[in-house]
Image (spheres, rainbow, N blue to C red):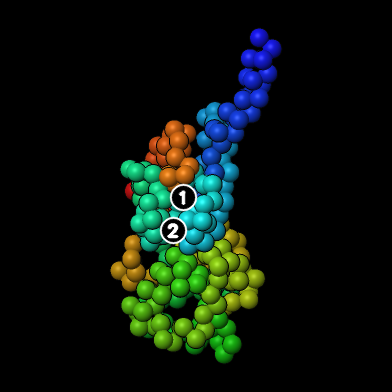
Amino acid sequence: MRTLLLLSMLLAPLQVQAAELTMFAAASLTEAMKDISALWAKAGHEPLRLSFGASSTLARQVEQGAPANLFASADEKWVDYLAERKLLADDTRKSLLGNDLVLIVPADRARKIAVDATLDIAALLGPTGRLATGDPKHVPVGLYAEQALRNLGLWDKVQPHLASTEDVRAALLLVERGEAPAGIVYATDAAVSKGVSIAGAFPEASHDPISYPFAVTKVGDNAEARAFMAFLAGQDARAVFVRRGFRVR
């Protein structure tokens, strides 16, 4: 009897720990996922362990064996990357959200700018200023930014003046601090900062649709992870995403 009691006491913490989920999510999802984690806990589950960063960095961590249950990217590319390597649980991938790509300036220099082929980059940045955005080599917001600038015929003028950052929040911070006179981020990032102002939005046709796919990882696949995927598509989570400025699909 004592053996059974001792065994049950030893197993209890493991059972609680097994119910906790670790989620790797794109930096632009920070506030929304914190809100949704609180709702998930209120519904009787363990709060999520959340790790935010560039989708590319997080995807590579999953590839290297990081113990994440779920992954959310700011583009389809990095979920494709994991799917091609068979690192995602079958039939769990869902593209739930969209966003807008915007040009930002420091709040104390707020102005409206036409974001089209007539955009005067030299006047915007000044003689030594740089345009902050995610690294176009791998960070989703930088990839979208490069597409948009190329399609508007501005890339060759902008490229020498880029301040490439590790994720979208780092680009936002450079503009907040006035260390960059302008930046390209998502509309939802600009919305959480009092230190920046949206100068204009890039035409939707100038870049691929901004898409946020979510999936359960193969190594972290369990009933709780799949239940959370269903929760993300539910009414309460959708309301959070809408309130945070995302386009809900």
**Res. 98 in view:** no
| Residue at figure coordinates x 58%, y 60% from the top left | 193
Q: Residues within 10 Å of mark 2 (few under 14, many from 20)?
A: many
Residue 242 horizontal/vertical position (percent)? 43, 47
**91 or 46: which is nearer to us?**
91
Q: Amino acid at mark 2?
A: Ala
| Residue at figure coordinates x 52%, y 84% from the top left | 161
The residue tagged 2 is 74
Q: Amino acid at mark 1?
A: Phe
* Residue located farthest toward the bottom when viewing the structure as drawn: 127
Q: CA distance from mark 1 to mark 2?
A: 10 Å
Query: Considering only vertical position in the picture, is 27 above or below 37?
Result: below
The residue tagged 1 is 71
| Residue at figure coordinates x 67%, y 15% from the top left | 3
Residue 56 horizontal/vertical position (percent)? 48, 62
- The picture quadrant where one finds residue 156 is bottom left
Do the numbered discs 1 and 2 sit on residues whose CB atoms are within 8 Å? no
